[in-house]
């Protein structure tokens, strides 16, 4: 039950993108097409889950025993960067098309604060390993939900007769704002 | 079986009760060389040559092609480009009548159709230049030659005439019921088919009764009254309504063993075989608010439009649109110099009140077009993609399955010219596919 | 090719353009030159229904509920309606003029937005809040997306949610319903608000009689709430009118209200002490207004019947979850906005089956 | 301190080893020149080269499928750069621009019917070939303007398209977009142009447009060197040997021939 609440919280109530405003860069960058957004979701879910697990292990099994908690951030970044590199290599081999369409945003998952955020929140909220894994995966899915909804809207916006001044990122940001407002309705579902 | 979608426009079939009037002989005819889908024929007459009525002016330019004929006896005055009802200039043969209307000596009846072999019947039909007279103008003999792996087991006579205003098929069914049914038997013999259907929309009960009474005893025909709904006369939907079979998307009716023919074609087939007549005359409806005397006429193929209009009392002063075919799928004309062709089932003249010029607005996604599309497409999305030249998406959304029936544009509250967008989109898509090889 | 950007969609002939007779054709004595005809692609006839007509019907369908609201909440309600409708028309007109865009305020769409916004505000709303709402609805939620037809979110709802988040106090100050003559400045609570408050204090149901509203009061609208959402009877009248005119499809309201009833019903059966009855849930709050008028907004909802049903069910689910377990007492606006966001995805996955296609639509494209 | 360094170093080592193994496993060969070329291309993704965007073109060049000087936007400089990367020399191509061969605006060319439908030339051309009486006339519904990635096409007050030659990169998008085929890529240095594509004969053409070429052959006779020839009742310029003498302009009875300076080029930002 607790894990379910954690999932609901991470996907809806405290959605990384729409409620905590983390990971905005890929959210805006690769939401132009639904297919790319799906690919990005996959990459983020993978990286976030793995990063959560490994960083939890590194923190609790390596840093805490050795009294090296101050290395937390740098160690996490290292882990995340490695995971991203790994995903990049795999994608380039297995799906060059997706690799090309994700472009710069794939390596930029490294600096995706949502991933680092998940890793540090795990520590801050004193999650167990199981909770950390679920939190990472659910956080990634929350990111996915947001970016998929957003990509759907943006694909349609492409066809809209938007005034030139608002075309592209401007209207996307307005849309993201409204979407975030709508997500506020979930406030209070999980304390 | 009811098909999904469809619309109920105002039918305005005011000429349903007026019998067919024969147009008197004219002094001049212009016969376009291309009156069918497929390769245009090769001209076999010369300028200045004397021709007899029914003499071929072209010979078929391939298998999917059909010859055209002299509508009356006279002299070939010119072979050059004339305005064509498709809206462009096309090669046509101008004939000045000598007033004698003498028959070409080559006209020879084959005899009673029951005594002929299917092959002979088929070649007679091909020689007479028969094409689908409902408007699609696909050469009939090609339709009657299904490939060996797609045998036809069901013949369907299309008497739906679902286009508003048009009554020519209706009159043919009432006035020439015997000929229609004999023609049906003839074509069933060509195909070696034993099972036939006759489908007529419920607003033409008299036509169905006439056909039923005229049906020869030896034919196994099922007569069905169809729901009055546009586009009931679309091949795929007619087959579905009558037999419950669904023609696969992108496929032809023969995929489900069906073949659909128009009533006019049936009569022409009989005349081609038993009288030796080639297709030089057809029944057409001249109607609408823009014409003074709406009527059904029987006119020679190649009759200039302005003579047809003059015969029907001329255009009203407010007339502002002239359409070849029905209001849903017909082609509007800018010139009265075009001529009647084999596939002209009607000439609709609308006056200015009915021809409001709309300004297309943006799609408001009301979904009315989705509800009425008989093909199960999403016209609203197709329209938006077509408008932005997004042809790849158009292909993904199956624009090629669109039958251009116009139901979507008919109901669109934003007056979006959806059919025009789809026609354009299909053309561009075809170009892209050709480029891709 | 953005025809709406270009004023030339139906080019009229330039002036001074003398009629030229048809085409270079064989020279023959013709009667007087025929008139220059109109040409267009098929079809050449039209059902005759247009956007303005639809919007006008929606407008009239809303009027009974607004009148009831004005009757119960008095002149302040009338003032709110006047400001939002006037504001919406003004902003729309100003924007179209300023940016020289096609379109016109006479198409009733701005008026409908204004009316819907007013119906979603408490009658006590200050004038400036109404104006801010009108601005957000017309300019931000609609016009900068390209105007009518292109807004992904329901403009009136965007405005309402924005106001609710920005000015929670003003947005939850409810006047007690009385009547236009005997205006009563006392404030009260909405039935759902009272319910949430009551439950959050650890009490068990049923609600004491003085805090709730009877079924009859709910139906006629004698209860606290936004000025247009109170009278279920008047709203149903308008909703049925729209259904009869064919402007809304049954899938959305039925899916929406049905799901709310189902979910709250299950919760109520499981624990009648902590959850209110489905009847109360269906008749109170903005559910009827939302289900018949906001969730059925054509532009922001799916185009297919199947999609509409999915949309309605989604709205109902989210509404029920927010009402039962969320922080806000009412979730209709949030639910509809969230489902608006999902509309493109719903559209994508609920395409009808192409006639004769053996496989499902999505697969057919690869064949 | 030492522990910290060791831990980090150890972590880095593990990660590095893992990645190294993964890189071996999932290795993909990419020609480095492809990226280099991609970097120097203009990035307009106009498709003027015939490829689906700049990176596709770069791939084509590296694979030897695309001509290194095929990028019309980058022009000679880009071609030279690509040549340097590929290790080949490129001969400089002459600058060319698009030109609309029609002067039949609303004052000159009458219409034959009232058109009601999409504001798009390609769509309008499906309805009776467009509303202009002249079968070759500019329909003025701005398809070319819409596709031009460089804003180099404007619609005149009389409702026909005009190329702003300073901005034109001769990518050729407008040429394919025009359903009437009246936009042509011409060398920017050619001074004299025939601005008509109507192939109708004298009287018919004259009725269709006051600027219509009637095929009178006066220009052909005047130049005499084959730089202007009349075929199919339509005069055209031989752009491999363009006429130079502006006096020919006066010969044309319908003012189809114009002297235009197309060689100006906008400053590149």
Image (cartoon, helix red, strand yellow):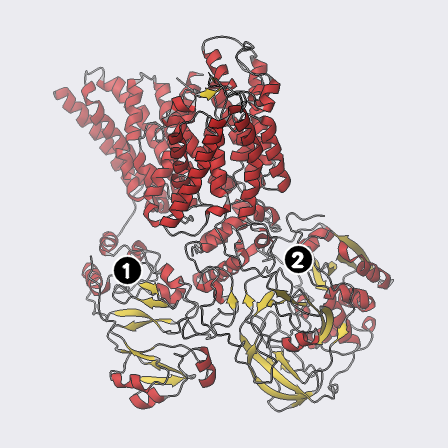
* The quarter of the displayed image where residue A66 is located: top left
Looking at the picture, does residue B207 appear above or below residue D229?
above
Camera-side mark, 1 or 2: 2
Residue B376 in the image: state x and y as whole percent. 59, 48
Q: Residue at x 62, y 42 (%)?
A: C245
Residue A23 in the image: state x and y as whole percent. 31, 33
Q: Which residue is mark 2?
A: B234
Chain letter of the residue carrying label 1: D
Residue C332 in the image: state x and y as whole percent. 49, 28
Q: Residue at x 58, y 30 (%)?
A: C235
Looking at the picture, does residue B395 appear above or below residue C147?
below
**Residue A89 shown left or right of residue B114 in the figure:** left
* The quarter of the displayed image where residue C179 is located: top right
Residues at discs 1 and 2 both on one chain? no
Looking at the picture, does residue B217 appear above or below residue C263?
below
Residue at disc 1, secondary structure: helix
* The quarter of the displayed image where residue C307 is located: top right
Q: Which residue is mark 1?
A: D61
Q: Is residue C107 visible from the viewing direction of this image? A: yes
Name the residue at the left extreme. D1
Q: Residues within 10 Å of mark 2 (few under 14, many from 20)?
A: some
Residue nearer the viewer, C133 or C164: C133
Residue A31 in the image: state x and y as whole percent. 37, 41
Q: Is residue B279 visible from the viewing direction of this image? A: no
Residue at disc 2, secondary structure: loop
Q: Residue at x 73, y 64 (%)?
A: B167
- Residue C344 badge: none
């Amino acid at each position: 039950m607790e894990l379910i609440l954690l999932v609901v919280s991470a996907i809806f109530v405290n959605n990384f993108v729409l409620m905590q405003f983390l990971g905005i860069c890929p959210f805006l960058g690769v939401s132009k097409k639904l297919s790319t957004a799906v690919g990005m979701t996959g990459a983020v879910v993978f990286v976030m889950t793995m990063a959560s697990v490994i960083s939890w292990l590194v923190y609790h099994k390596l840093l805490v025993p050795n009294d090296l908690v101050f290395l937390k951030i740098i160690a996490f970044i290292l882990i995340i960067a490695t995971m991203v590199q790994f995903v990049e290599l795999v994608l380039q081999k297995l799906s060059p098309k997706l690799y090309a369409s994700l472009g710069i945003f794939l390596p930029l998952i490294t600096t995706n604060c949502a991933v680092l955020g998940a890793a540090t929140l795990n520590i801050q909220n004193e999650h167990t390993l199981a909770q950390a894994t679920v939190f990472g995966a659910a956080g990634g899915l929350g990111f996915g939900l947001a970016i998929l909804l957003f990509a759907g809207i943006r694909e349609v916006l492409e066809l809209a007769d938007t005034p030139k001044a608002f075309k592209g990122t401007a209207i996307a940001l307005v849309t993201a704002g409204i979407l975030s407002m709508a997500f506020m309705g979930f406030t209070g579902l999980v304390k | 079986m009811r098909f999904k979608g469809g619309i109920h426009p105002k039918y305005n079939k005011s000429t349903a009760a007026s019998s067919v009037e024969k147009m008197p002989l004219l002094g001049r005819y212009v016969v376009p060389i291309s009156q069918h889908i497929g390769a245009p024929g090769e001209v076999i007459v010369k300028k200045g040559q004397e021709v007899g009525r029914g003499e071929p002016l072209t010979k078929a330019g391939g298998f999917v092609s059909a010859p055209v004929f002299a509508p009356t006896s006279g002299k070939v005055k010119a072979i050059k480009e004339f305005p064509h009802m498709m809206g462009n200039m096309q090669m046509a043969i101008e004939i000045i009548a000598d007033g004698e209307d003498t028959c070409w000596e080559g006209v020879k009846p084959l005899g009673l159709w029951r005594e002929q072999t299917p092959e002979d019947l088929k070649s007679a039909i091909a020689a007479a230049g028969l094409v689908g007279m409902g408007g699609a103008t696909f050469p009939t003999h090609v339709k009657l030659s299904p490939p060996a792996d797609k045998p036809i087991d069901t013949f369907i006579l299309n008497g739906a005439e679902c286009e508003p205003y048009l009554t020519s098929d209706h009159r043919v069914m009432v006035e020439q019921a015997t000929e229609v049914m004999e023609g049906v038997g003839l074509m069933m013999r060509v195909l070696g088919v034993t099972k036939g259907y006759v489908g007529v929309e419920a607003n033409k009960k008299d036509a169905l009764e006439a056909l039923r009474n005229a049906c020869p005893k030896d034919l196994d025909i099922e007569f069905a009254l169809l729901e009055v709904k546009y586009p009931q006369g679309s091949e795929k939907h007619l087959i579905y309504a009558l037999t419950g079979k669904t023609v696969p998307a992108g496929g032809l009716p023969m995929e489900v063993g069906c073949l659909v023919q128009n009533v006019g074609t049936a009569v022409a087939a009989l005349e081609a075989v038993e009288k030796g007549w080639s297709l030089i005359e057809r029944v057409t409806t001249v109607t609408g608010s823009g014409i003074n005397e709406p009527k059904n006429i029987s006119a020679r193929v190649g009759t200039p439009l302005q003579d047809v209009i003059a015969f029907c009392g001329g255009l009203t002063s407010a007339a502002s649109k002239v359409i070849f075919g029905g209001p849903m799928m017909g082609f509007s004309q800018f010139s009265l110099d075009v001529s009647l062709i084999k596939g002209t089932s009607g000439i609709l003249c609308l006056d200015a009140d009915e021809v409001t010029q709309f300004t297309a607005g943006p799609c408001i996604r009301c979904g009315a077009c989705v509800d009425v599309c008989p093909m199960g497409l999403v016209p609203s999305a197709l329209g938006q993609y077509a408008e932005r030249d997004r042809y790849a998406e158009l292909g993904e959304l199956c624009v090629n399955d669109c039958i251009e029936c116009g139901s979507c544009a008919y109901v669109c509250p934003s007056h979006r010219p959806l059919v025009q967008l789809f026609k354009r989109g299909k053309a561009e898509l075809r170009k892209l596919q050709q480029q891709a090889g | 090719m953005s025809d709406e950007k270009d004023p030339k969609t139906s080019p009229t002939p330039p002036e001074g353009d003398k009629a030229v007779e048809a085409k270079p054709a064989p020279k023959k004595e013709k009667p007087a030159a025929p008139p220059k005809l109109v040409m267009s692609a098929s079809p050449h006839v039209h059902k005759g229904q247009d956007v303005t007509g639809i919007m006008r019907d929606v407008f009239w369908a809303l009027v009974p509920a607004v009148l009831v609201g004005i009757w119960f909440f008095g002149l302040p309600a009338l003032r709110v309606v006047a400001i939002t409708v006037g504001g919406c028309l003004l902003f729309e007109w100003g924007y179209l003029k300023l940016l020289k865009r096609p379109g016109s305020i006479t198409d009733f769409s701005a008026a409908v937005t204004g009316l819907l916004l007013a119906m979603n505000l408490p009658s006590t709303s200050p004038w400036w809040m109404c104006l801010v709402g009108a601005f957000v609805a017309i300019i931000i939620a609609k016009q900068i997306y390209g105007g009518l037809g292109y807004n992904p979110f329901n403009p009136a709802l965007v405005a309402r949610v924005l106001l609710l988040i920005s000015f929670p106090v003003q947005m939850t100050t409810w006047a007690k319903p009385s009547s236009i003559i005997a205006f009563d400045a006392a404030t009260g609570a909405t039935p759902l608000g009272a319910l949430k408050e009551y439950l959050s204090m650890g009490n068990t149901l049923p609600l004491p009689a003085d805090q709730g509203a009877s079924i009859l009061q709910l139906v006629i609208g004698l209860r606290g709430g936004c000025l247009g959402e109170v009278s279920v009877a008047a709203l149903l009248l308008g909703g049925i009118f729209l259904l009869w005119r064919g402007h809304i499809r049954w899938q959305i309201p039925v899916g929406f209200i049905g799901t709310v009833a189902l979910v709250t019903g299950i919760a109520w059966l499981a624990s009648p002490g902590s959850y209110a009855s489905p009847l109360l849930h269906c008749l109170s709050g903005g559910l009827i207004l939302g289900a018949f008028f906001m969730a059925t907004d054509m532009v922001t909802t799916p185009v297919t019947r199947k999609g509409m049903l999915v949309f309605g069910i989604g709205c109902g689910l989210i509404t029920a979850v927010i009402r039962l377990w969320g922080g806000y007492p009412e979730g209709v606006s949030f639910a509809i906005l969230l489902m608006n966001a999902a509309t493109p995805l719903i559209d994508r996955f609920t395409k009808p089956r192409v006639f004769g296609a053996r496989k499902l639509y999505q697969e057919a494209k690869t064949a | 301190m030492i522990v910290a360094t060791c831990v980090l170093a150890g972590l880095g080592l593990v990660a590095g080893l893992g990645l190294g193994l993964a890189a071996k496993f999932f290795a993909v060969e990419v020609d480095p020149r492809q990226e280099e070329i991609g970097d120097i291309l203009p990035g307009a993704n106009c498709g003027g080269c015939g490829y689906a965007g700049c990176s596709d073109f770069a791939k084509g060049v590296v694979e030897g499928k695309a001509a290194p000087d095929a990028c019309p936007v980058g022009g000679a400089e880009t071609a030279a750069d690509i040549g340097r990367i590929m290790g080949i020399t490129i001969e400089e191509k002459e600058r060319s621009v698009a030109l609309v061969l029609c002067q039949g605006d609303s004052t000159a060319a009458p219409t034959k019917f009232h058109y009601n439908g999409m504001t798009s030339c390609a769509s309008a051309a499906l309805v009776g070939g467009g509303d202009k009486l002249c079968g070759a006339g500019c329909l003025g519904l701005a398809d070319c303007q819409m596709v031009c990635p460089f804003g180099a096409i404007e619609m005149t007050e009389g409702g026909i398209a005009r190329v702003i030659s300073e901005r034109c990169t001769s990518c050729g998008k407008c040429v394919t977009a025009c359903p009437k085929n009246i936009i042509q890529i011409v060398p920017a240095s050619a001074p004299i142009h025939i601005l008509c594509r109507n192939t109708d004969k004298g009287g018919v053409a004259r009725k269709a447009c006051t600027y219509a070429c009637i095929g009178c052959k006066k220009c052909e006779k005047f130049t005499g060197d084959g730089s202007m020839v009349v075929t199919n009742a339509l005069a055209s310029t031989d752009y491999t040997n363009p006429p130079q003498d502006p006096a020919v302009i006066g010969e044309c009875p319908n003012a189809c021939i114009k002297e235009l300076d197309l060689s100006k080029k906008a400053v590149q930002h």
